[in-house]
Image (cartoon, rainbow, N blue to C red):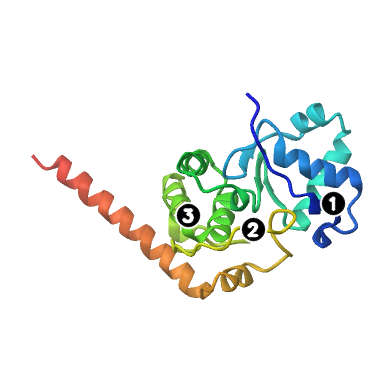
Amino acid sequence: MPSYHPIFSGLWNDEDLAGLTFECKGFFCYLCTNDHMRPSGIYRVSDAQLVAETELPLPSVQAHLEALQTRRRILRDSAWLFVRGYLKRQPKQERLLIGARNDVDNCSSVLILESFALKYPMYSRWSTDRLLTINRPINDMPSPILTPAPRIYNPSPAPTGPSPDGPPTTPDAVASENGHDPEQIRAQIVAEAKAIKLKYAVSQAREQTP
């Protein structure tokens, strides 16, 4: 079924994409508008699928993915792909947010779930809940690149920029940019996860009590 995916015309002269070939920019447009795209910007697509759908050779597909990831336009983890900033530029309608929440619930990439939480602090609880269902203790969860931010509602003005996301930053810089202390974020995420796990354990114990 056809769907609508807005693309800003300024993408073609976006400073953050300066130096990329026309083909690479066109490839990025495809990642934002193909049939796999979901409201959250998170979806699964293999390199082989991208080769078949774009009719580009595999080395070109892989080179474009690497170039876009270097500029933090996307995040790639195995077959999972996260187009960073896509959700930010969609109308926040109830049905769209429900779809975005479902996307997070179905994602099994820890790296992308963490990145989504940092990109969208107001929806970070979605990632926190999903991370608890993945078979990895919250205290043992490494933070190689990103750490989830707390659930904070801080609506921003409607975007006017040309394309998703902004310049490369470190994880702590991303958190600071959202007005949060990185160490406080980490502590709050762990505390929230422990509270949820404790509540679940208590409910299970009550159910087993005759």
Q: Residue furthest left?
A: 210
- Image quadrant in which the N terminus is located: top right
State the image coordinates of residue 33 (x, y, percent, origin top left). 71, 37
Drawn side of residue 197 relative to residue 95, left or right: left
Residue of label 1: 12
Which SS class for mark 2? Answer: loop
Are the residues tagged 3 and 1 within 8 Å (C-beta)? no
Mark 2, residue position: 159
Q: Residue at x 83, y 57 (%)?
A: 17
Answer above or below: position of 90 versus 198: above
Callout 1 amino acid: Trp
Query: How many residues crowd around disc 1 within 10 Å: few (fewer than 14), some, or many (20 or more)?
Result: some
**Element on which disc 1 rests:** helix
Q: Nearer the viewer, residue 62 or 102?
A: 102
Viewer-nearest of discs 2 and 3 = 2
CB contact under 8 Å: marks 2 and 3: no
Query: How far from the left and from the top, in percent, is residue 176?
Result: 58, 74
Instruction: Identify the mark nearer the N-term, 3 or 1.
Output: 1
Q: Label 3's element?
A: helix
State which tag comes first along the sequence, 2 or 3.
3
Q: CA distance from mark 2 to mark 1?
A: 17 Å
Residue 199 visible in image: yes
Q: Quadrant of the C terminus?
A: top left
* Whole-percent x, y for residue 189 in the image: 43, 63
Q: Is residue 21 left or right of residue 204?
A: right
Q: Residue at x 52, y 43 (%)?
A: 100
Residue in front for this viewpoint, 198 or 100: 100
| Residue designated by label 3 | 123
Q: Earlier in the sequence, mark 2 or mark 1?
A: 1
